[in-house]
Image (spheres, rainbow, N blue to C red):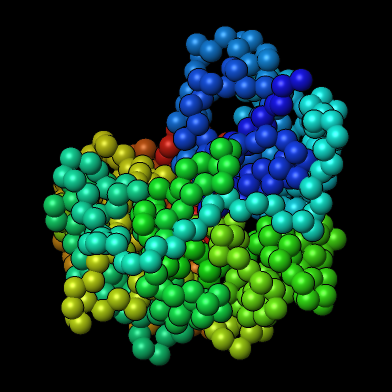
């Protein structure tokens, strides 16, 4: 019998889905099955008709959209011209990762499952809908789903006779092997290669933009440090519109890089090349130059300061020889141990580097060849662009809240990207940040007469600053901004700019300062107060309505306030108000971009 290959295809935005896909790959390896793990967009989707066994793992982003590395695949799969039986030879399963606190919970996985059935695929089991809100986290669904998946799969595709599965406690071979070079290679230019002028900057070829401005915009006494940062993109060919986002990959802090190298007895100045150990592993990661220095690997590639995932403990456990450490690591990798892993790791936001220091015996046993199996790659971060090229040619500006908070751990927790960006000081010499731009989810109307109503509390105002600058430059003056923050004197971003634009008749500004009086006043209260203006703009002038900001309660509260406005001013029922908002959403006249 021919040995079948399991193909695991993933669509991932933040790396969690990729991690799950790689875990399925490791499980296949333990069951002596040939496997490949690939991102959906690097896979040639035309080959799907000749595959026999595929698992699709996908997340859902924004308003029910597929992740970036799945968009090409998605467009292909939903072509009307595909014959109804094109996948009749395919056995497959779909696992979705989502969060039921969002309205479009696991929308992509559900839709993919239906579409594969339409194309004649044979589903090995019902779609798995993992949920971040589950008591045990996403694993509460993933573990039982995988158990059942392997039972079905191994009955249809039995492993080769006479080969026992590889036990959980045994090491799997590493994906790559390191070969250290004796001398430093000539002219190493790992860091910033300026993209050639024809290519648009992208993830693998970002543009090194010079930081020209980095200033705190909150009052020194305010609890939060928010920065206005400006990048020079002269000569980059980057074009962007209001609503677009700028992408960048942060570097690990110098002291973390040093500590990591000491723990693992690595010399940051040494160079190495990598070779793949197995045909099923993709080529060496494209972002790693060959040869590469240890410093580049640890500073710019390995995500050592993130809270590690369960897979990290699974790999780490196979190195443990100290009994106490081994017991703990095995517990953390098991389905039953997810509660204690959560208390140890996720709740206090313990970093992978801190875990290594907590397990010194195991860390001492680690083989460098496993670094890329243990640590995921640093993922790019996205920021709403807060400027318009029409007002600031060759510039990208962002509003950045520096993430820093206390947990049970002694050392304050810091956001990797925000701390790194905040630390860059253009006054002390040139600093460059490799970046690229991608389409955002907010789209603003082309019709010059369409009014735009924007609700952007806090740093949620960033995309609206871009929109107002762009629209004012094009002579579109029907702009209404609801801005909310804690205090007029402490975190009222872009105040002088708004006041000047109001004076020139470019916009109407409505503010809510929640802590400046006894009763808290939020943007949703102001939305209700402005019911006449809003009804006039929406019902009579076809206005577009936008929300951006933190995903906690704000978006829901603003939607509720807006529906109250419809009921009050339009004299309609609650059901009709819901329908009206739904209709606006379907036609793109209501859009929101929120983040947690």
Q: Is residue 52 above or below residue 104?
A: above
x then y, percent, for residue 260: 52, 76
> Residue 308 or 486: which is nearer the viewer?
308
Q: Residue at x 13, y 52 (%)?
A: 235
The answer to whether residue 470 is left or right of residue 80 is left
Q: Is residue 330 above or below residue 577?
A: below
Q: Residue at x 55, y 84 (%)?
A: 412
Can I make out residue 28 in this image?
Answer: yes
Count of numbered circles on the image: 0
Where residue 342 sits, quadrant-wise, is bottom right
Can I make out residue 386 in this image?
Answer: no
Q: Residue at x 69, y 52 (%)?
A: 172
Q: Residue at x 74, y 70 (%)?
A: 320
In what quadrant of the picture does the C terminus appear?
A: bottom right
Where residue 191 sits, quadrant-wise, is bottom left
Q: Is residue 198 above or below residue 100?
A: above
In what quadrant of the picture does the N terminus appear?
A: top right
x then y, percent, for residue 176: 54, 52
The answer to whether residue 388 is left or right of residue 272 is left
> Residue 253 or 559: which is nearer the viewer?
253
Q: Is residue 347 above or below residue 93?
A: below
x then y, percent, for residue 303: 51, 64
Where residue 456 sits, quadrant-wise, is bottom left
> Residue 160 or 233: which is nearer the viewer?
160
The answer to whether residue 395 is left or right of residue 350 is left
x then y, percent, for residue 9: 59, 36
């Amino acid at each position: 019998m021919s040995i079948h290959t399991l193909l695991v295809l993933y669509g991932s935005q933040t790396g969690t889905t990729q991690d799950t896909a790689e875990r399925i790959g490791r499980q296949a390896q333990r069951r002596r099955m040939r496997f490949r793990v690939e991102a959906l967009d690097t896979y040639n989707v035309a080959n799907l008709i000749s595959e026999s066994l595929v698992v699709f793992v996908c997340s859902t982003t924004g308003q029910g959209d597929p992740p970036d590395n799945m968009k090409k695949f998605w467009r292909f799969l939903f072509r009307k011209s595909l014959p109804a039986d094109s996948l009749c030879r395919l056995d497959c399963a779909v696992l979705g990762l989502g969060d039921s606190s969002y309205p479009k919970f696991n929308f992509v996985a559900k839709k993919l499952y239906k579409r594969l059935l339409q194309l004649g695929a044979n589903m090995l089991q019902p779609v798995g809908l993992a949920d971040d809100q589950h008591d045990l986290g996403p694993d509460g669904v993933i573990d039982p789903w995988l158990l059942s998946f392997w039972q079905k799969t191994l009955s249809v595709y039995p492993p080769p006779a006479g080969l026992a599965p590889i036990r959980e406690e045994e090491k799997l071979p590493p994906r790559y092997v390191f070969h250290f070079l004796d001398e430093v290679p000539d002219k190493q230019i790992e860091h910033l290669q300026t993209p050639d002028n024809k290519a648009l900057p992208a993830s693998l070829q970002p543009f090194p933009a010079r930081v020209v401005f980095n200033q705190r915009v909150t009052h020194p006494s305010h609890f939060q440090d928010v920065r206005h940062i400006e990048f020079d993109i002269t000569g980059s060919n980057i074009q962007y519109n209001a609503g677009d986002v700028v992408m960048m990959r942060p570097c690990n802090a110098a002291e973390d890089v040093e500590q990591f190298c000491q723990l693992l007895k690595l010399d940051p100045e040494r160079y190495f090349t990598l070779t793949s150990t197995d045909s099923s592993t993709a080529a060496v990661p494209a972002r790693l130059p060959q040869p590469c220095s240890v410093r580049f690997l640890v500073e710019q590639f390995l995500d050592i300061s993130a809270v590690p995932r369960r897979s990290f403990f699974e790999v780490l456990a196979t190195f443990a020889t100290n009994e106490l450490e081994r017991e703990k690591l095995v517990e953390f990798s098991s389905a039953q141990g997810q509660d204690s892993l959560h208390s140890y790791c996720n709740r206090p936001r313990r970093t992978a580097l801190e875990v290594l220091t907590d397990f010194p015996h195991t860390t001492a046993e680690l083989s460098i060849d496993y670094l890329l199996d243990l640590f995921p790659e640093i993922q790019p971060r996205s920021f709403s662009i807060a400027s318009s090229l029409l007002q600031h040619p060759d510039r990208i500006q962002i509003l950045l809240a520096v993430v820093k908070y206390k947990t049970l751990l002694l050392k304050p927790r810091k956001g990797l990207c925000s701390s790194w960006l905040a630390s860059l000081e253009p006054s002390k010499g040139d600093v460059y940040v490799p970046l690229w731009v991608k389409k955002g989810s907010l789209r603003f109307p082309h019709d010059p007469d369409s009014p735009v109503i924007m609700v952007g509390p806090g740093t949620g105002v960033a995309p609206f600053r871009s929109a107002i600058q762009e629209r004012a430059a094009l002579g579109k003056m029907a702009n209404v901004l609801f801005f909310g923050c804690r205090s007029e004197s402490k975190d009222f971003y872009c105040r002088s700019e708004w006041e000047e634009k109001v004076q020139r008749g470019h916009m109407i500004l409505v503010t809510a300062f929640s802590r400046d009086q006894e009763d808290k006043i939020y943007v949703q209260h102001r939305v209700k107060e402005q019911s006449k203006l809003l009804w006039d703009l929406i019902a009579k002038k076809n206005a577009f309505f936008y929300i951006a900001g933190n995903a906690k309660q704000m978006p829901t509260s603003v939607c509720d306030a807006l529906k109250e406005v419809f009921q009050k001013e339009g004299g309609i029922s609650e059901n009709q108000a819901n329908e009206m908002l739904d209709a606006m959403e379907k036609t793109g006249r209501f859009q929101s971009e929120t983040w947690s």
